[in-house]
Amino acid sequence: MLALLFVLQAATADTVPAQDTVPQVTLSDALRRSAQLDPDYVQALGRIDNAEWSRRAAMLTFILPSVSVGLDETKYSQDFFNPANPAVPTSTLVVGRATANYEIFSVRKFAELGRTKAELASAEAGEVEQRYQAALETESSYYDVLVNQELKRVADERVARAKEGLGVARARVSSGAAVPTDSLQLVLELTRAQVDVLRQQNALRTSRLDLGRRVGVAGPVDAAPMDTAPAPQLPITMADAVRSALDQGPQYRAAQADERAAEAALKSMRSDYLPTVSIGGLHQRYDTQIFPGAANISSLTFSVSFPLWNDGQREVAASQARVDRDVARAIRQDLEGAVRRDVTRAYDGYDALRAAVELARVAVTVARETYRMQELRYRAGAGTILDFLDAQVNLAQSEADLVQARYQTRLALAGLEAILGRRLFSGNPS
């Protein structure tokens, strides 16, 4: 029965599928490609285009009048007075017209100019926020691939150690130096290690597909390996980080810009309570055929309009704009109040993870030495199978913890940079 278990375990280990060869991208290339594919970032770029056109339109109202042209042809059931030739009645009338209107004085024009300027600033701030958010999500997917690659390596090494331990136990059982249950314990460890390999293979395949989706590839994409040098100390202090977040942090800049845009929109709505002075011109031509030219009339009109009541629509629009302004102000105040919390959490989180990486390196060193000593003790018959198994499991767990801590540190740095709106190290991809 024990021999059959050995055969089954060896066969299972040999049937673990190998990873397929997949295309590989660097982090900078992944960031560049994903920025053009992220829906939120594409929407943010579209908001800038829309805001720029609104800004141009608001500026052109100070220079150009609104102009329209039209051509009408009407057929009547009987002849009627012909304005093109009063002496000859006609049943067909063609009218061509050109209309121009220019607002000489309108507070709304100035209010709209301020509103479109604020909306453009809001759109630009939103673009920066979405760019860093897209970069953070892409880095997360990239590091997820690297983490699963290394965890797969750790799982393979665990399988190799379990096989080696099983060989040692088999030899000791055959020589009578150990009981058969020692081999069964190591068979169980080998089974668990092989299951862990399969689990990591699936996680790696999924993470590669996610990275491929972000860079626009219809399939899995591998992440190029990165250096494993210790994470450097942050080049700025906590106080500088807080000030930097308030000055140029994408989230806070976007909130401030949104508040200014909402305030400008409220002013634009309130401008409807003031009169407007405008001048309009009209030129009409009449005839019985297309491109009329038989008779023409021109007019020039000066007008002053003072809106008094339009069934409350103006008041409703002003109230909605005021509520939007109050909400935007509350969001900005809340974010500014939370900036120290957010920066402190990201800053301290990075420092804590840097320390965790160093502690994890020490733990791996200790676990390897413990495993080596327990293996020697078990081979010599001075140690128990439980101590040997504990050493194997602890080494695998320590190596996995080191992998996780190393890439969590990189992700924590990316999160802090997303809050600050700038890269902290020159070597980082932008």
Image: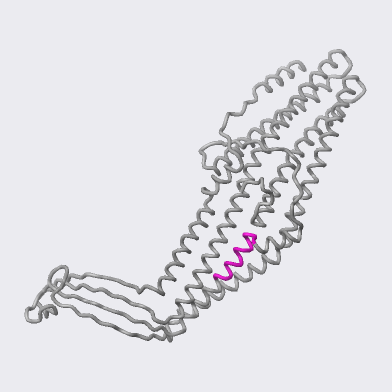
Residue at 81% across, 25% down: 185
Was residue 252 drawn as part of the magenta stretch in this picture?
yes
Tell me if 425 is positioned left or right of 108 in this view.
Answer: right
Q: Is residue 329 above or below residue 192?
A: below
In the depicted view, which residue is nearer to us: 395 or 416? 416
Using the rendered view, name the quadrant where residue 156 is placed. top right
**x, y (%) of residue 149?**
67, 34
Residue found at the far right of this picture? 382
Q: Is residue 422 above or below residue 398?
A: below
Magenta residues, start to end? 248-261
Residue found at the far top of this picture? 175
Was residue 393 drawn as part of the magenta stretch in this picture?
no
Residue at 76% across, 17% down: 1
User: How is this picture coloured?
Assistant: one colour
**x, y (%) of residue 83?**
14, 80
In the depicted view, which residue is nearer to us: 72 or 202? 72
**x, y (%) of residue 66?**
34, 73
Tell me if 279 is positioned left or right of 357 in this view.
Answer: left
The tally of labels here is: 0
Residue at 42% across, 82% down: 105
